[in-house]
Amino acid sequence: MIILDRTNIAAEDQSGDMSRPDNAPESDKPQAHNEETRKAIFRDTLTATVTFDFAMRLQQGIFNNFAVEVLRIQPAQLGFVRGINEIPGLLTAPLAVLAGYFRENIWAGICILMGALGLVFYASTTTFPMLILATITFSIGFHLFYPVQSSIIMKSQLPEERATKLGQLHSGSAAASLVSYFIVIVITRYVSKVNYSLLHGGAAAIAAVGGLMVMMRKGTSTTVAKRKMEFNKKYMSYYTLTMLSGARRHITMTFAGFLLVQTYKTPVSTMVLLAAISSLIAIFTRPAIGRLIDRWGEQRSLMVNYLIVIPIFLCYAFVKWPLFLFLAHIVDNATNGFDVAIQTHMGKIAPPDALANAYAMGSTMTHITGVSVPMLGGFLWDVAGAPTVFLMGTCFAGLSLWYSQQLDRVEKTIKTTAAAS
């Protein structure tokens, strides 16, 4: 239903492995953090991610009931709120320029606290304008947090363990989602009068704890990111794969569940169960996928991923057996863990001080597809039927498979250019 710092790191402890050559790209050089510091940075980042993801999933789980039962909003108003929620995502790259004025752990904490403030606004919301204010505030917080989350991990962890660490972060997120699903199910089934203000306030407090922990982390010695928005042609492989992955993911998010509900009349209890199973599986598969990426490399891992995704989309398009589609839906969600390889690929081709802005630019591109692809898919569904939508997803996965075959060459070219200069 849902990434933190790394720039030029001052010499905090010179005991790290310095075996890489001096002409290695900056993003591939080991950091000066010792093992204890790396573990502390990861622990605080994980805590911030888990607490914020829990708060976000809880808010998402109760939002529809809150909007209807408390605010009595109409469908047109709901659609407007959903659209407003995506605007900060489109503006992630320009807004991320502000990160250049802060150390990244400080910026990550500010973003989470911004999200917590949005939850406080939700807790006191009684009118539609107040709902808009709460939505925009919360959306700015979580859209700006995840790019800097990836950056922190890429900068603080050793190159050979970055994907594993990102996978562990995603595993923690999945566990937080699972707990929030359980809470929502219990509340909706067994509580006759839900106190939405208390739930939003509790979620805000939990998120704030994680934000303060990552903000107060001492001794990271990381520099600030670049203070400008930048579209760099050298990173075109990252941009392209991010857009293609976003397009494929938005088809799944928008239309896979809709297919199960509209065409096969899947009840809400089954849909919640599928989401819970997907989160439970992700807890164990995301770290394993991360280790696989560290072992295989980005090109091979992504090719395997898309070779799995293509038949899944063909199943959505042509298979008529609901139980088989349930399985396809679960496997489809599990393959999202391979998107870590796109992030670690960026870590190999960009210098540390460019990572946060590059990840923010990638987030903006993902939201461009998030707006355009569902609209195009909805049009195709109405005009030509559901199979055409998933055939479009098959095409996106096929293009991703073709494009990912050149990642090793891209990385080698950039390293050679860096060595020559």
Image (cartoon, grey):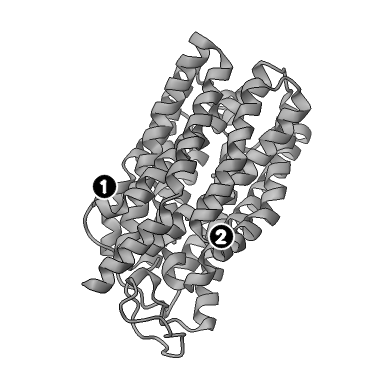
Residue found 55% across the figure and 32% down from its top: 253
On screen, residue 168 versus residue 215, left or right, reads: right
| Residue drawn at x 63%, y 33% as measured from the top left | 312
- Position of the N terminus, as image quadrant, is top right
Which element type, helix, strand or loop, lies under badge 2? helix
Front-most of residues 327 and 196: 327
| Rendered location of residue 217, percent (x, y) | 45, 73
The three-letter amino acid code for the residue at tag 1 is Pro
Instruction: Check whether the beta carbons of the residues at disc 1 and disc 2 lie within 8 A of each other.
Output: no
214 shown above or below 332: below
Q: Is residue 290 visible in this depiction of the protein?
A: yes
- Which one is nearer the viewer's eye here, 326 or 153? 326
Nearer to us of marks 1 and 2 is 2
Q: Which mark is residue 296?
A: none
Q: Which residue is mark 2?
A: 293
Which SS class for mark 1?
A: helix
Name which of mark 1 and mark 2 comes first in the sequence.
1
* Residue depicted at x 71% and y 18%: 264
Q: Residue most toward the top?
A: 383
- Check disc 1: other Cα within 10 Å, few if <14, some if 14-19, many if 20+: some
Horizontal arrangement in the rendering, residue 56 relative to residue 237 (left or right): right
Q: How many marks?
A: 2
Where does label 1 land, which residue? 94
Q: Is residue 94 above or below residue 274?
A: below
Mark 2 neighbour density, 10 Å: few (under 14) some (14–19) many (20 or more)? many
Which sits in the foreground, 190 or 406? 406
Quarter residue 267 falls in: top right
Mark pair 1, 2: CA separation: 31 Å
Residue 382 location, x and y as percent? 51, 11
* Residue 112 visible within the image: no
Q: Quadrant of the C terminus?
A: bottom left
Amino acid marked by disc 2 = Ile
